[in-house]
Image (cartoon, rainbow, N blue to C red):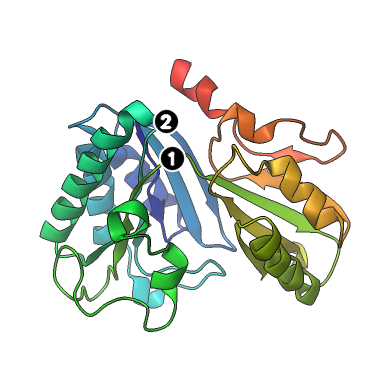
Amino acid sequence: MIAVPNISEGRDLTALDAIAAAFGPGLIHRSSDPDHNRAVFTLRGEPGELHTAVLSGAREAIARLDITHHTGVHPRVGVVDVAPIVYLDAAERGAACAEALVLADKLGQLGVPVYLYGELGGGRTRAELRRPGGLPARPDFGPPTHPTAGATLVAARPPLVAFNVEIDAGIGTARAIARRLREDLDVRALGLQLHDGDRVQVSTNIEDHTRVTAADVVAAVRAHAPVIAAELVAPAPRAALANFPADVPLRGPKPLEDHLTS
């Protein structure tokens, strides 16, 4: 199984290097973005051990970062914003749920409020928890508040494809496209204005790549604006990239299966 902790820091490379080292030898990929001001780490590990690696990196991040000073276009609730345990097939689901609950408990013991989402959280979503006033007064684990770390969202889930599409259009168009994607394809989507080169991006999370692929997202975006390029934020299953259009430059890591067999 794997874990994909998202850290609310994408600019301080010294801090990110230290956090990456703390995650240990199971780290198979990392990416960061200064506009989002966010880093995504992908770790592999065995049941009963993976939560320890995630906890080690989380401890380093909490010691170094302060969410009260954070700026960036990506929504967030904490320094260790989300820390999902990902099962790659149905046989791992039970072990992943157990690993996620242990991780949530251990993060709570560090003094961080932890909220479960997805299946473990009764179906509530990250977006619901990130809305103003969306965090319940009583977390699932840990104390109600932490002065600098904010909160952490924990789940057990199948692979999610974090996929961004850069368009030649304004932010109003990007937000309208994101709304259509949420309605028509049932993917998580935001229209974002990036400061690097004044670029505009439709940022998506594809939660079921067996139903909606990255190519489907590109086609839906292209129906409303020219597509300049696309980006995978973290390793994704090869099937998620099936029939990807050859005329769209795609940045990002090699497929997840390649990372797990290397």
As displayed, is residue 240 above or below residue 224?
Answer: above
The answer to which of 215 and 235 lies nearer the viewer is: 215
Q: Position of residue 115 (x, y in %)?
A: 27, 64
Q: Earlier in the sequence, mark 2 or mark 1?
A: 2
Q: Position of residue 143 (x, y in %)?
A: 14, 71
Residue that protrudes farthest toward the bottom in the picture: 133
Q: CA distance from mark 2 to mark 1?
A: 6 Å
Category of crowding for the residue at label 2, using alpha-carbon neighbours closer than 10 angstroms: few (below 14), some (14–19), many (at least 20): some
**Given the image, on which type of amino acid does mark 1 rest?**
Pro
Residue that protrudes farthest toward the left in the picture: 109
Residue 154 relative to residue 89: left or right: left
Residue 259 relative to residue 165: left or right: left
> Who's the residue at 56% across and 62% down the image?
36
> Who's the residue at 25% across and 26% down the image?
46
Q: Which residue is mark 2?
A: 88
The answer to which of 255 and 80 lies nearer the viewer is: 255
Residue that protrudes farthest toward the top in the picture: 262
Q: Secondary structure at mark 1?
A: loop
**Given the image, on which type of amino acid does mark 2 rest?**
Leu
Residues at discs 2 and 1 in contact (Cβ within 8 Å)? yes
Q: Which residue is mark 1?
A: 158
